[in-house]
Amino acid sequence: MKTKIALIFAVLVVILSACAPAAAPTAAPAPESVFRSLGSNSTTSEQAMPAAPAPSASGNAGGAAKTSDSATAAQARMIAMSVDLSIVVADPQKKSDAIYQMAKSLGGYLVSENMSQVYASDGTSMPQGNISIRVPADQLDNALNQIKAGVVTVQSENRSGNDVTSQYVDLQSQLTNLQKAEQDLQDIMDEAKNNPGNNSTTKTQDVLNVYNQIVSIRGQIEQIQGQMKYLSETTSTAAINVTLIAEQTVKPISSGGWKPLVVVNESAQELVKFLQGFVSVLIRLVILAIPVLIVIFGPIALIVWGITALVKRRKARKAASQAK
């Protein structure tokens, strides 16, 4: 029994070393206390086993590449499709609502919507923005046809695809190895629980050590399962990003006819520019011109005032002396 347990540990170490580079968290090394508690014959059994010849690095690389290629070939291609569309419409808000309802009817959903107000050449305001949706991949062409129906013009349309098949196959291989390692650890923990040769303290420590490794591997399994779920959802649906441009904003300015609103708008802009210039002149006059005038002409004014006051005083004295 102890020899069997030692062999299980050897297989487990090989499996964990193969999975460790691809997994996010690093699995904790197998604690030595578990080997010690399961019996002293484990060392002897390992020494009795013949050593396998170490394969060359090039052989390993070639085998791994062949395995990955064959697995990828067996796996259906997984392509994440996305489309960027720019359209001109008469009413962007109405078209955005229609696109949202269309996505729901096809089994898709809304990712984001952003609308803002812009101004046309005649001064009127209207909404304009973008909307992002996801629809089933097999409904992509149908959705695009419905979006482009009734538009003024399609300014641009860009399609792109990202092949994630190899990434998904690698995750599947990692998941299989980790699940096998988890099962082996569970068997070892059961052996540690039922080992009559351990006392209570040793048995508790052994079970805790193996349990911590199981928890670590389960965390890696959940992370890989989450990545696989994300890839599956990404490839089963297609992303459509639509930019909605208001028709009035791209129309050329008409030269015929009188447009009071345009005149009012232009006059208001000119008035604002005039007031801005006038206020700017006042600010410069108060902050710059007046202090400069005081510094330059202030002393001259004081001298003139002093001379005038002196002349007046002399005239007053002269008039007083003549009166006597």
Image: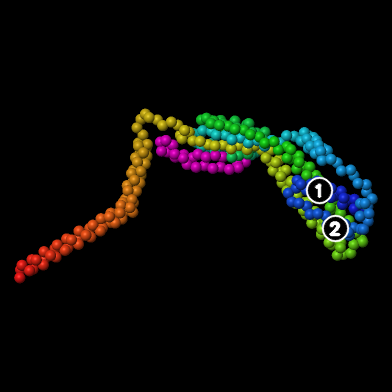
Residue situated in front as seen by the camera: 143 or 298: 298
Q: Which residues are magenta?
A: 109-131
User: Which residue is located at x 52 percent, y 30 percent?
Assistant: 153
- Quick one: label 2, few (<14), some, or many (20+) residues within 10 Å? few
User: Which residue is located at x 76 percent, y 47 percent?
Assistant: 21
Q: Is residue 188 left or right of residue 171?
A: right
Q: Which residue is mark 1?
A: 17
Query: Please, what is the three-letter code of the amino acid marked with disc 1?
Result: Ser
Kindly indicate the quadrant of the structure image that contains residue 202: bottom right
Q: Which residue is mark 2?
A: 32
Q: Residue 279's mark?
A: none
List the single residue furthest toward the top.
256
Does the magenta portion include 73? no
Residue situated in front as seen by the camera: 279 or 299: 299
Residue 72 seen in render: yes
Could you say where residue 260 lies in the image, as x and y percent from the top left? 35, 36
Quarter occupied by the N terminus: bottom right
User: Helix or strand or loop: what does disc 2 sit on?
Assistant: helix
Which secondary structure type mostly characterizes the magenta part of the structure?
A: strand
- Quick one: label 1, few (<14), some, or many (20+) residues within 10 Å? few
